[in-house]
Amino acid sequence: DQQVKQNSPSLSVQEGRISILNCDYTNSMFDYFLWYKKYPAEGPTFLISISSIKDKNEDGRFTVFLNKSAKHLSLHIVPSQPGDSAVYFCAASDRDDKIIFGKGTRLHILP
Amino acid sequence: DTGVSQNPRHKITKRGQNVTFRCDPISEHNRLYWYRQTLGQGPEFLTYFQNEAQLEKSRLLSDRFSAERPKGSFSTLEIQRTEQGDSAMYLCASSLQYFGPGTRLTVL
């Protein structure tokens, strides 16, 4: 049973517009959430994280929103740039400190 | 380079052979994680270490898999009697924020 779900396998967004990537989770014990970006033949690169005591965290063009009651988080990228084209993974951690990944969403930034 | 390194980057082997991968984490990090990623999936947790102690192993880690971190520095992941289903990218992470480039294993 998937504890972290990314229901959109792919997403296409025009350059300069906002990209919104969504993630749902089922385990209410998760208290720390992370987003990673991955290019082919490379390991995941950490982007941004959020603790369950917050509902928003911002870092430059990247903002993560957390809705605990809905068990939902989203990553907003604005403005989207060509270099943002990659696979994005949502991940969650409980007090065990290991992380559980979603299946990823492939983001295409269109010129 | 002070990041996480993994060797080899690619490994092609025949079914039934043993393979060993190495991970060198960031030196001051106590935690070291191993993950496996197959096509179309996110990385799946295999095991992790706090210094030299192996704290947790996933059910994915069958008896053919063994991981060590003998001096709390580098780690090795060995797969014995490889099967075609072992073909995947094996990722090492030094803390949760720093992943290595991975070792891609192909079992023929």
Image: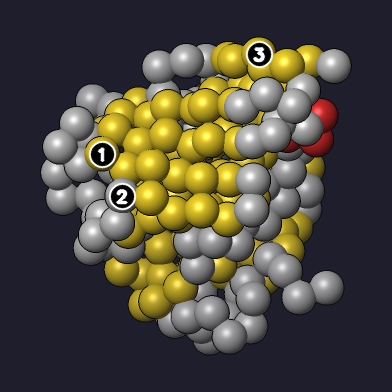
The residue drawn where x is 77% and y is 32% is: A81
Image quadrant assignment for residue A41: top right
Q: Nearer the viewer, residue A95 or B31?
A: A95
Image quadrant assignment for residue A84: top right
Please give the residue where the numbered disc 2 appears in the rendered image. A55
Q: Which mark is residue A12?
A: 3
Relative placement, left or right, of A49 versus B17 is: left
Residue A106 sits above or below residue B48 on the image: above
Instruction: Of the two numbered discs 2 and 1 on the same chain, state the one appearing first in sequence.
Output: 2
The residue drawn where x is 71% and y is 59% is: B6
The residue drawn where x is 38% and y is 30% is: A23
Residue A46 sits above or below residue A2 on the image: below
Chain assignment, label 1? A
Which amino acid type is shown beneath numbered disc 2? Asp
Q: Are marks 3 and 2 on the same chain?
A: yes
Mark 3 vs mark 2, foreground winner is 2
